[in-house]
Amino acid sequence: MARIIVCTLFAVVAATLSTGLALAKEVYNVVIVETLPVPIVTESRIEFEKELVRIMPDYDIKVTTYDAEGSELRATEILAELAKQPAPDLIVSVATLATRALNGSNHFLDVPKLFMAVSSPVEEGIVPAIGASSKRNITGESHVLDAKVKLDMLEGVLKASNPTTPLTIGLIHSTYPSSSSLVNQLLALNGTYKHINLVAINTPYLEGDEGLVAMTGNIVEKLQQRKSELDGYWLSSGPLAEANGLVAKVKERTGLFPLFAESISSVKEGALIGVVSEPVSIGKSAARKAKLILENSSAKDMPVGKMDTYTVAVNVSTAIKLQLPIPSNYLKLAKQHVYQ
């Protein structure tokens, strides 16, 4: 009897171990380096993680996230520390400074890399052109529309009211790399639109939460000094676009409204029109690329592209105050993103 019991127990244990082995999932270690925890960065990263787990249910995805605190130097230090550990299966950088550090690092040339929420991968030297692939085993996509498309959209709004002179619009931005690059692209087209005259208004980029507060104060002061020459301003992509209360503070001190913004939150706060890739779209698109890489596609062979999903938003209250009627086709494009 004792022998039968022992044999039975052995069979149960063996069956349990066999089942456990059969159920064990292959583990993928993914490292994420964020530039700074502003909404577009954090929300894109969260959506990336959720989507990657959802579309790879047969794998155990282990994600470790690092915050570079708005500093390229800090991102470089993080990567140097990571290089002392076993190499992950994939490194993901979110936003420009973390991506710049990752692309410039020589520690992970054999590790596939993916970036998201980077406005200007060409200007950053990641690839020579959109549609090309990188030689440094990194891929990803830009999340912003071409400058011409954005200017075309704003011109479409302005010409509906047929102003007698061009509207002078302040391009407010920090010297954060992507912000400066986007503004330079817009300025390169200045003078080609009948109703738009662009002028640059910038503030030095400052790291961290305190830096964001200081940058906001600097921009509000500069706009106050130049309000008599401006009809409105353009809130470019970058840290300033994520600053809490910037639109309200500018309105209170100057009476000026953003005529174009590259964040939905700014349109909710009063910007006339905005076009942007939302964090949900950014994160999900990056997750699909990550899945291909983890399933043995080569990052170095994957072309760097542009997002193909954008959200249009309009603020009808601002349009009424500025006597700038929104064309009906814009309202149709905005759908559920019409604010007042």
Image (cartoon, helix red, strand yellow):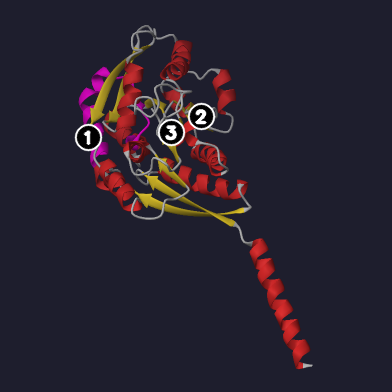
List x then y, in percent, for residue 5. 75, 88
Q: CA distance from mark 2 to mark 3?
A: 15 Å
| Between marks 1 and 2 in the image, the one whose residue lies nearer the viewer | 2
Quick one: label 3, few (<14), some, or many (20+) residues within 10 Å? Answer: many
Q: Tell me what residue is drawn at x 44 percent, y 32 percent.
A: 267
In terms of depth relative to the viewer, which is nearer, 91 or 94?
91
Q: Tag on residue 218?
A: 1
Instruction: Please state if 72 lies on the left or on the right of 258 as rendered.
Output: left
Q: Residue at x 22, y 29 (%)?
A: 222
Q: Is residue 225 magenta?
A: yes
Give the label, 2 or 3, closer to the camera. Answer: 2
Q: Dot 3 lies on which element?
A: loop
Q: Is residue 308 visible?
A: yes
Of 32 and 314, nearer the camera is 32
Q: In terms of secondary structure, what is the magenta stretch mainly?
A: helix
Give the answer, above or below, for where 213 lies relative to 218. below
255 vs 93: above or below:
above
Q: Which mark is residue 307?
A: 2
| Badge 1 density bin: few <14, some 14–19, many ≥20, Cα 10 Å | some
Query: According to the image, label 3 marks what residue?
Result: 263
Mark 1 or mark 3: which comes first in sequence? Answer: 1
Mark 2: which amino acid?
Met
Stretch in magenta: 214-240
Sequence-earlier tag: 2 or 3: 3
Image position of 226 (left or right of 34)? left
